[in-house]
Image (tube, grey):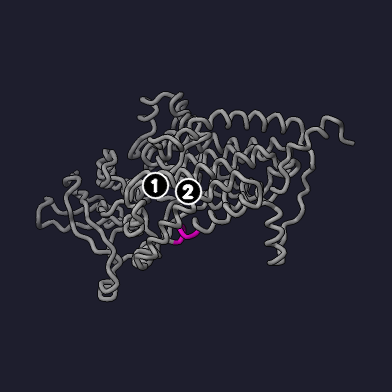
Amino acid sequence: MPTAVTDGLAWWGAGDYDVARQVLQRGVAALLVLAFAQVVTQFRPLLGSHGLLPVPDFVARVPFRVAPSLFHRRYSDRLVVGVGVAGAVLAASVVAGLPQRGPWWVPALVLLACWALYLSVVNVGQRFYGFGWESLLCEATFLVAWLGSDAEPVPWVGVVAARWLLFRLELGAGLIKWRGGHEWRDLTALDYHHETQPMPGPFSWHAHHLPRWWHRVEVVGNHVTQLGFPWLLLLPQPFPSVAGAVVVLTQAWLVLTGNFAWLNWAAMVLGAAMVSDGVWRTVGSWTGVAPSASAATSVASSSFVVATALVGALLLGLSWRPARNLVGPRQLMNASFEPLRLVNAYGAFGRVTRRREEVVVEGTDAERPGVEAVWREYLFRGKPCEPGRRPPQVAPWHLRLDWALWFVPLGSPSGWVVVLVERLLEADATTLRLLRVDPFGGGRPRWVRVRLFRYRYTTRAERRASGDWWVREPVMVLVDPRGR
């Protein structure tokens, strides 16, 4: 029989969000599986002891308090693989719903372990982990760790925190655009974006060639979605459900027209979690698949209430600087205000580039790199290379080397590109596995150089005539030929 104390804790449960908890916990965990799989497959050639930006060098100059990571204590390539495998296994258990069957602290410990492991990776990841969705995944993982198990009601603190995260994600992206380049205000941004975005997808060429009036509709729709609808998250239901549904639909269009790693997928998980159980039951009654009633008790355990209350107070205290960032005239995008990345600022594409330039890496077997040399191109998995190749669908997988190369023509620090040349001259096997085609079949070229090319989509007429998706022309030599 419930006591007076437990009766007094009944209000702690939000109610009507059991489906949302499942969506958040399992959805975020699925993204963690992907992220840890990338640690196993990509971290060593990029950041390992013999990588392009070695972690041992980074931790030697950056103190733990600035970038807390278990790799400050010790780093080895074998250890980082262990971190990736352990994180993937823990996250997969949450996807399967195993920790959620126990008391509330079991999924909390599992997800906090995932958070600590991934934070350790991100904080030493430098250029290759310098993306907003890394902080987003860290913050979301910490948040869902406190949603409890199936034996507990969904805490209202968790519901509010999830809404606050989606609010910052969407409104931050909308404000950074409105305050950024004039192309967002004169509605011309989408005239260029589908062509110049970091990683075009299979339908990006088609999206670029849609009528200009449609691009204006896209920009207006973006402003309405990111500047207007987030405010519905601050209202009672069913308004948050409406806002969440809009986020899912608009993010699905971005998935269709580009490759932004798991950013869009994370936003869709958050959007779907805004939908109440009542709305899911209504939709289920239309489709014949209604969610089952929750087996959770109506009263939260006292230990769960204390833990989530403390976490809620922590998140509230850390929210001041991100909130001030939203309203401030010098808004930062994709910024963390503390090294644990618990409450962050988000935003993307404050400016849209109008010209696409791509790094092209070539090697030759010639004795000298003169005009007689025959240069062969290294081909990458995702970024534009040969004009006849249709841009592939790679998201939610993140090709970190391809993404980092997109920033090089924009002026990003790129000393690591010279290291990439050296690894190709060595025919380093782990580096070559990041590529789609090694023109030397694992052998060592005599010379490697890096050139910059101007890329643009073919017109409809050019595509019919040649079958190509791109037209490219050389701009300059970025790294002069280096030999062994």
Callout 1, which amino acid? Answer: Trp
**Residue 39 appearing in the image:** no
Residue 342: image x %, image y %?
A: 53, 34
Asked if the residues shown at circle 2 and circle 1 are in contact, with their CB atoms under 8 angstroms apart, the answer is: yes
User: Most prominent secondary structure in the magenta stretch?
Assistant: helix
Callout 2, which amino acid? Answer: Leu
Is 434 located above or below residue 456 in the figure? above
The residue pinned by badge 1 equals 178
Q: State the extent of the magenta-drawn residues as a range.
A: 252-256
* Residue occupying image coordinates x 65% and y 28%: 310
Residue 474: image x %, image y %?
A: 18, 56
**Residue 451 appearing in the image:** yes
Q: Is residue 385 left or right of residue 96?
A: left
* Residue occupying image coordinates x 68% and y 56%: 279
Q: Which of the labelled discs sits on residue 359, or is there none?
A: none
Residue 259 part of the magenta segment: no
